[in-house]
Image: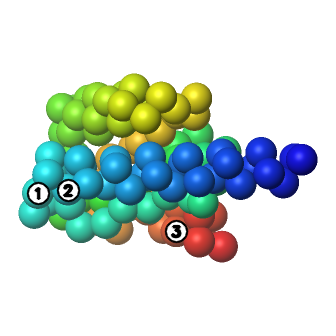
Amino acid sequence: MAQLIIEIIENRWNKAIRKYIEKILIAFGDSLVGFLSPSNPNITVYDYNAVIVLNRKPRKDDVNLARQIAREVEKELGLDVLIVPIVVEKGDLIEEEAYGIFEG
């Protein structure tokens, strides 16, 4: 039973992340150079489960936009898990750590 619950959560998470990526591609355009997220929303790096990587230094409005889009996706899909994004510049330590944790 526990395995079934985990699979349901991961399937909902994967669907949410696909939708989230679609929206951030539009929002960030050519500035977006990468996106990292785990297969399970409970796996985090510094409490973030989504890392948006830009080819420039992020601005405060980038972070607000990423959070706004996350809330929209959660609402659209009726999620009970949160997408907790951080926006970083390519080469940032968080990007490297997230790659190791999420992909490891």
Q: Nearer the viewer, residue 95 or 2?
A: 2
**Marks 2 and 3: which is nearer the front?**
2
SS of the residue under disc 2: helix
**Label 1, label 2: how many angstroms apart (C-alpha)?**
5 Å
Locate residue 67: give its quadrant: top left
Q: Are marks 1 and 2 in contact (CB under 8 Å)?
A: yes
User: Residue lying farthest right?
Assistant: 1
| 2 lies left or right of 43 | right
**Residue type, label 1:** Gly
Residue 79 percent location from the top left of the image: 52, 32
Report if residue 82 is visible in the image: yes
Percent of width and height locating residue 38: 57, 59
Position of residue 27 in the picture relative to residue 39 (left or right): left
Specify whether 56 is left or right of 17.
left
* Quadrant, the C terminus: bottom right
Tag 1's secondary structure? Answer: helix
Say few, some or many: other residues with alpha carbon within 10 Å of mark 3 (under 14 / 14 to 19 / 20 or more): some
> What mark, if any, has residue 99 been given in the picture?
3
Residue named by callout 2: 25
Residue under the image location 84 percent in, 54 percent down: 3
> Would you name the residue on which mark 1 appears?
29
Q: Are marks 2 and 3 in contact (CB under 8 Å)?
A: no
Q: Quadrant of residue 5?
A: top right
> In the image, residue 37 lies at what x, y percent?
49, 57
Amino acid under disc 3: Tyr
Instruction: Looking at this view, name the residue that lies furthest to the left.
Output: 30
